[in-house]
Image: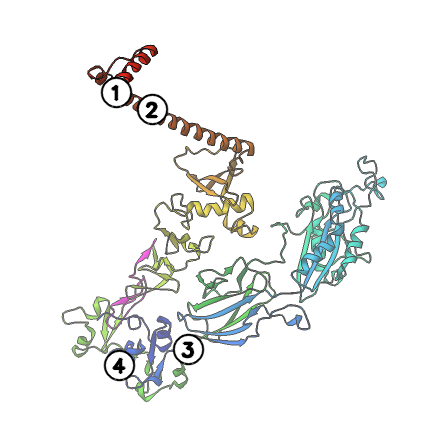
Amino acid sequence: NRLNVCMSGSALSCEECLIIHPSCAWCAQEKFGSARTLMSRCDLRQNLQKRGCEAHHMESPRSSTKVVKSEPLSSKGSGPTQYDVIQIMPQKISLSLRPGDQTSFKVQVRQVEDYPVDLYYLMDLSLSMKDDLDTIRNLGTKLADEMRKLTSNFRLGFGSFVDKNMSPFSYTARKYQDNPCNGYKLFPSCVPSFGFRHLLSLTDKVDRFNEEVQKQMVSRNRDAPEGGFDAILQAAVCKERIGWRKEAFHLLVFATDDVPHLALDGKLGGLVQPHDGECHMNEKNEYSVNHLSCFQINQTFTTLIIRSKVELTVWDQPEDLSLSFTATCQDGQPLPGLRKCADLKIGDTVSFDVSIDARGCPAPGTQQSFTIKPVGFKDRLEVSVDYRCACGCTDQTQANSTHCSSIGQYTCGICHCDPGYLGARCECQEGEAGSMYLSACRQAEGMQICGGRGECSCNQCLCYESEFGKIYGTFCECDDFSCARHKGILCSGHGECHCGECKCHAGYIGDNCNCSTDTSSCVSDDGQICSGRGSCACGRCQCTEPGAFGDTCEKCPTCPDACGTKRECIECRLFSSGRLSDNQTCQRLCKDEIITVETLKTDDPNAVLCLYKTENECVMKFTYSEHANGMSVLTALKEPECGAAPDAMTVLLAVVGSILLVGIVLLAIWKLVITVHDRREFARFQSARSRARYEMASNPLYKQPISNDYVETDFSMYSKSYNGAAH
């Protein structure tokens, strides 16, 4: 039978057994197993039970989690308990870790409503900021109105800066000392220049802020850069002067129209002493010492009050610990590999499942700790760690035990023999050999003794040493170097070689442990694995949707949903509308280049033409293509195409004309029908008339009509004749 991971290891003690794999257990029972092999005590727990090891003699500790402190999350930040605002739960936990045995715990984070906020407005008062000074004269009221929507516990402070009052940064000649604008025609009068001036400590009286701003006047320095970094540093370190509260969220708004002086610029003025990081404001609340600037800017100052996302960071993580995160955001769907949630509002609660395991055992008694902290929060979760690498049975160790022929140490069911002795009970001396022992050193009849990689001594195989690693096993059949490699590295460096098979560390799989199970690199900007168009294998996306490509299968011009997906970006980027109209969401999800044109060309065979109807019943057109450099490019019309509304008179004339036209057509048809009918009737009349003439001509009783006189005379004669006959 093939050896399992526990029995294939090189465990010669209980502690070594526990390190092999978290499923391994050690049987410390005195009468157990075969006397022929020492490794039979290290096995799977169920196997040990089948072989007769009682449960209370088994050593198989498990990793565990203990919550030390878990105060409930706060719902609001203001009030009498603002010093105890809780935004992360739990606050303290204790972990007991067995190497390879993963355990987990849940972390909940909520940005509470009404959290105390201190905002210090630091403004550049150089001459180029004159127009901006006019703009912010009522800024305090506006800021307060906006901040009251977020918190009722808001304080506002104010400070200003220009530049170092020394050459070559400022005008230092005597005629400029009181008025640096002397001789400047565009603005002939201004106040003397200064480095940093603290004007208003943090207060909840907004009118005070407005009053201080109204008093301010601009100054003038010589070069374009300003002394903003000196001001920022003083505002940060002079905590008592500024009035920063420990329990509040600190926000510094930095307003300037040019870049600050960078590190070492002060050498131009002869400054060589770097800043000591201390507060140097005099009794006038002005920065009184000139130092070299000590840092440089690495990001644009933006509003930080409304956190749209929660992201966890890990501080002081021990090297032998492996952590993985699964985020559950507002939609309730778990997102493996992610440690952040976006598009959140104040008061939303999100949770994270944190899985942790140890890759090895430090020195006995070692205790370590690390911290999990949401970015931008003062709250944190403190995690203490101890290791379960020792066996309880070692507490009953017996020196020179009778179980070991009084020449060895008995611990956890086995003997550790004194030098020169060996055997399960230390019953043999090194060098003894005999035919009765040789059969016990063959894995099967006819096979080499100890597999040809060792010698048989006292019923046991003593394996040879190897320059490549360790040879071990009952019959020296195993080693820790004959395993699969990746790029020449045994088990890819992510596993241990046990008897010809790589046993991968947590987070890796495969024959050579080169396949990572971490899916964070496969998560696309929309939070889906491989954009829903593929699967994540070994930390890389394998796109299954025809036409999809990219690191996260995010590019797919020919996919059925390509136009729909890009439409949302067109709407939010060009028209600030649609589902992604929130500026932060739009910037996060829509990073493609968008080119606007008056006329859209549709003859590019590599571009997909997309159309959609807007709310105004107009048609928006754009094309979607992928460049060779991997960039997605959207070419869109500047404005949707909308048909012009018809003129009312034109519509009226068209309707009337249509009616007349229809009437004329109907009259023409009626006339045609009547004409045809009349002609047919006339033809019948002519035919009847012709027949009547023929009949009169051939009738013997018919006489040709005569004149009137003839008729009357003839009639008289006829009457007489008639009367005579009557008589």
**Comparing marks 3 and 2, which lies closer to the viewer?**
2
Q: Is residue 49 above or below residue 478?
A: below
Sooner in the amino-acid sequence: mark 3 or mark 1: 3
The residues tagged by marks 2 and 4 sit, at their Cα atoms, a distance apart of 119 Å
Q: Is 57 in front, or is 699?
A: 699
**Residue furthest front in the image:** 727
The residues tagged by marks 3 and 4 sit, at their Cα atoms, a distance apart of 25 Å
Label 3: state its secondary structure: loop
Residue indicated by mark 1? 687
The residues tagged by marks 3 and 1 sit, at their Cα atoms, a distance apart of 134 Å
The residues tagged by marks 2 and 1 sit, at their Cα atoms, a distance apart of 14 Å
Residue indicated by mark 4? 50
Answer few, some or many: residues within 10 Å of disc 2's Cα (few below 14, many 20 plus, some between 14 and 19).
few
Asked whether disc 3 touches disc 1, contact meaning CB atoms under 8 Å apart, the reply is no
Q: Which residues are magenta?
A: 464-486
Sooner in the amino-acid sequence: mark 3 or mark 4: 4
Q: Residue at x 35, y 71 (%)?
A: 21
Residue indicated by mark 2? 678
Asked whether disc 3 touches disc 4, contact meaning CB atoms under 8 Å apart, the reply is no
Label 1: state its secondary structure: helix
